[in-house]
Image (tube, helix red, strand yellow):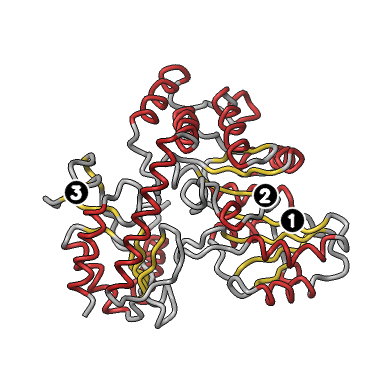
Amino acid sequence: MSTRNLDHALMREIEVLREEGRAKAPERIIVDYIPPSGDKGPRYMLEGLDRQFIRMNSNSYLSLSNHPTLIEAADEATKKFGVGPGAVRFIDGTFSLHVALEKRIARFLGKPAAKIFNSAYTSNCGLALAIGNKQTHWIGDELNHNSIIRAMRIANVPGERKGIYRHNDMDALKQCLDEVPNDVERVVIIFDGVFSMRGDHAPIDRIRKVAEPYNKGLKDGVLTVVDDSHGIGAFGKTGRGAAEYTGAQPEVIVGTFGKAFGVNGGFVAASKAIIEAIRQKADTYIYTNPLGVADCAAAIKALDICDSPEGSERLRNLHERIRQFRDGIDSLGLESIPGPHAVVPLMIRDTQKTHRMVDSLFENGVLVVGLTFPVVPRGDETIRFQVNAAHTKADVDYVLDILSKLKD
């Protein structure tokens, strides 16, 4: 058997992606990490290049991935239990650190229970499989992350069991609720906590207020679900995310250990019944090996740091650097989407100019993400910057200085 014909067909499909501007560029390879020194934050080396880079495209908002306490915890756990679990959770693949991490993240978020997954992506898919049935109606924000969209597809949500509302538009959400069919028993309103391309957040307090009157008319009620992967750890007064920032708790919180906490893995935090349903029904939990114990041990230490004076200081510096960068953009007369989050979109609104600016930032040692047509609509072309706690005042000043030279 040969894959020759298939290879040709796949390469033609990839070529179409290139022609449409949707193909991924070759992946850059990080080959070294240079710790912070003096007034400089951490720097990175890329394969084939003899210069250092500031990462302003990293989700590691609290800059914990190189923290010695996390590394030590991961090493100790690996030496004790090995590098892999050797089985799924149901077949003696559950280690004490899996359970400890589930209890720790539930306590951090003020929920009765939690279940960990290999990623937030598989967490969303597992949750949908666990809580959805033929009498479930799903309602989501139009800018929801791909993992939420995919979760609804995996749960086989038909068109008549789904509503999409305009981004953060509460009148549109109400209209979706008004259009729920009469035979529906439960409604799930699902949305991002912080929207990863824009840095704005869901108004959870207003969403709950809109949803409340509809709760009594449904057998199983209305369930609000937030995927706050970009918020938890980095957003809110103590890093509890969009729920803390808006002062309103959804029934279910999905998140990740792979962003602010600097490790790997995802989770769902909710009632004990929802978590047990996940354990019994979620394919993405049941049929795959769990996180390695090293990730679990490191994530527990990350949560402990977040609840410590050191964590408060990291969060304070992160928020200060966000303000510095946003104020700098404003002073340069550049356009962004307002908000207090570490995701700072710079609106360029032109594909070629976006490419030129991304390339120029790269030549000056700054890594960012450019979003251009057709990935985004014409006129919405953007450069996404992400501020981290290890960025220094000098780092941010350096990037703003480059932007001042490039803006025209």
- The residue that mark 2 highlights is 252
Identify which residue, 82 or 404, lies in the foreground: 404
Could you give the CA–CA distance between mark 2 and mark 1, rounded to whole angstroms? 8 Å
Residue at 20%, 47% in the rendered image: 40
Q: As drawn, is 267 to the left or to the right of 199?
A: right
Residue drawn at point x = 42 percent, y = 46 percent: 315
Q: Looking at the figure, which quarter contains the C terminus?
A: bottom left
Q: Nearer the viewer, residue 404 or 361?
A: 404
How many numbered marks appear? Answer: 3
> Residue 201 lies in what quarter of the image?
bottom right
Residue topped by disc 1? 223
Indicate left or right for 121 with 171 as reference.
left
Q: Does residue 204 sit above or below 294 in this rendering? A: below
Closer to the camera: disc 3 or disc 2? 2
Q: Which amino acid lies under the numbered mark 1 shown in the image of this protein?
A: Leu
- Left or right: residue 297 compared with residue 251: left
The percent coordinates of residue 30 (x first, y second) are 25, 47
Residue 47 image label? 3
* Residue 19 seen in render: yes
Q: Give the residue displayed 87% in from the left and 60% down from the top.
A: 216
- Marks 1 and 3 sit apart, C-alpha to C-alpha, by 47 Å
Helix, strand or loop status at disc 3: loop
**Of callouts 2 and 1, which one flags the residue occurring earlier in the amino acid sequence?**
1
- On the image, the x and y values in percent for residue 394 come to 21, 54
The residues tagged by marks 3 and 2 sit, at their Cα atoms, a distance apart of 42 Å
